[in-house]
Image (cartoon, rainbow, N blue to C red):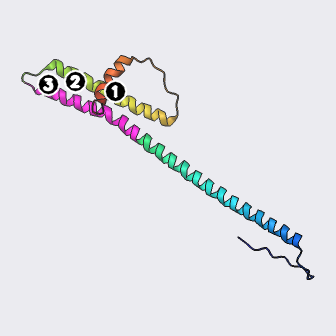
Amino acid sequence: MGVFEFFSREVRDADPELLQMMTTVGYRVGQFIERTRAEDALRYVREELAQASQMATVAELSASIAHEINQPPQAVLANGQACRRWLTATPPDIEQARLSVEAVVRDAKATADVVSRIRALFRRTTPAKVRLDLNKLIVQVGPLMADDI
């Protein structure tokens, strides 16, 4: 680890107690250096772990946001295509087309709501508390989750 050198103006015989004391001091300094290196390594590993954790969180958040943003436009597209089929049928089924257009409007509003919630998430605002009809929510989520289910 290192060398201690001591100089004296006078030449002396080796003093066993002094040598033992210097050995102990050297050993203690060596332990201190080892501990300092270990603490530095631990600090570095903790920083790396924190950074990896942050990256994993960002990746998870990104995937969640992408999923949230992707679902409503997919529903808008499906309902728009259904509306087109109802209107081009012979004879056109106006009632079914009207229902499809209503679903497009509902899903477009859902898209806007998702974007608003994501913006609020990054503004760190307190989420709004609203009454929620759980049955209606399940009915709305069913078609969105159909592929995953």
Which element type, helix, strand or loop, lies under badge 3?
helix
- Reading the image, the residue beneath label 1 is 109
Name the residue at 81% across, 65% down.
24
> Whole-percent x and y of residue 104?
26, 26
Residue most toward the front?
16
Q: Which residues are magenta?
A: 63-89
- Reading the image, the residue beneath label 2 is 100
Is residue 78 found inside the magenta-colored segment of the image? yes
Report, in whole angstroms, how far the alpha carbon at label 1 lies from the one at label 2: 14 Å
Is residue 127 found inside the magenta-colored segment of the image? no
Name the residue at 48% across, 24% down.
128
Residue most toward the right?
10
Among the 4 quarters of the image, the one containing residue 148: top left
Amino acid carrying mark 3 in the image: Trp
Check whether the beta carbons of the residues at disc 2 and disc 3 lie within 8 A of each other.
yes
Report, in whole angstroms, how far the alpha carbon at label 3 lies from the one at label 1: 22 Å
Q: Residues within 10 Å of mark 1 (few under 14, many from 20)?
A: some
Q: Quadrant of the N terminus?
A: bottom right
Question: Which SS type dominates the magenta stretch?
Answer: helix
Q: In the figure, 20 relative to 111: above or below?
A: below
